[in-house]
Amino acid sequence: MESSSNCTCADFEQAAMSKLRSLVPLLSQDSKIFREPWGSSTVICFDFSRCPHLYSINQDQTKVISQAIIKLGLANSMIFRLGNKTIGWSKVKP
């Protein structure tokens, strides 16, 4: 097992996104999830370009995603994309 002193920021990001996926099973494994800095804030980006037919996040699902993001302390907002096209945005709310 690798010691924690050998972990990188990329390792942390990968672990955080894996944990987010485990807390929100409605997210497709084909969707790309990553954090992106926006000025002094950080947003979680959900890119459905590899599975556009699966994109249909409703308000209740957004609440579930928000709760998981808050639990992990990952961001203040989330953006939903199809490639470079933004198709939705929401503040993270408890």
Image (spheres, grey):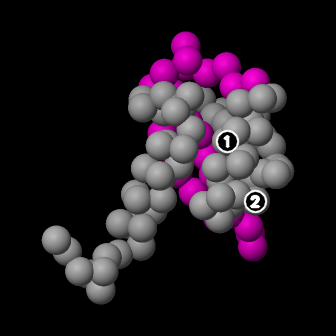
Look at the numbered disc 2 and give the secondary structure of its residue. loop
Q: Nearer the viewer, residue 81 or 73?
A: 73
Residue 75 visible = yes
59 to 37, vertically: above or below = above
Residue annotated with mark 1: 65
Q: Dividing the picture into quarters, in which one does residue 61 lie?
A: top right
Q: Is residue 48 magenta?
A: yes
Look at the numbered disc 1 and give the secondary structure of its residue. helix
How many badges with numbers are in the image? Answer: 2
Front: mark 1 or 2: 1
Q: Residue at 41% x, 59% y: name it.
A: 15
Q: Which mark is residue 76?
A: 2
Q: Relative to residue 32, is residue 74 drawn left or right?
A: right
Q: Residue at 69% x, 25% y: name it.
A: 57
Q: Residue at 57% x, 57% y: name it.
A: 35
53 to 81, vertically: above or below = above
Residue 87 visible = no
Give the mark nearer the N terminus: 1 vs 2.
1
73 to 88, vertically: above or below = below
Amino acid found under the numbered disc labelled 1: Ile
- Magenta extent: 32-58
Q: Which mark is residue 50?
A: none
Can you give x and y, in whole percent of width and height, for residue 40 in the image? 75, 73
Q: Relative to residue 10, is residue 82 drawn left or right?
A: right
Q: Residue furthest top?
A: 53
Can you give x and y, in whole percent of width and height, for residue 50 in the image? 45, 26
Can you give x and y, in whole percent of width and height, for residue 74 in the image? 63, 62
Q: Relative to residue 76, is residue 15 drawn left or right?
A: left
Amino acid found under the numbered disc labelled 2: Asn
Q: Residue furthest left?
A: 1
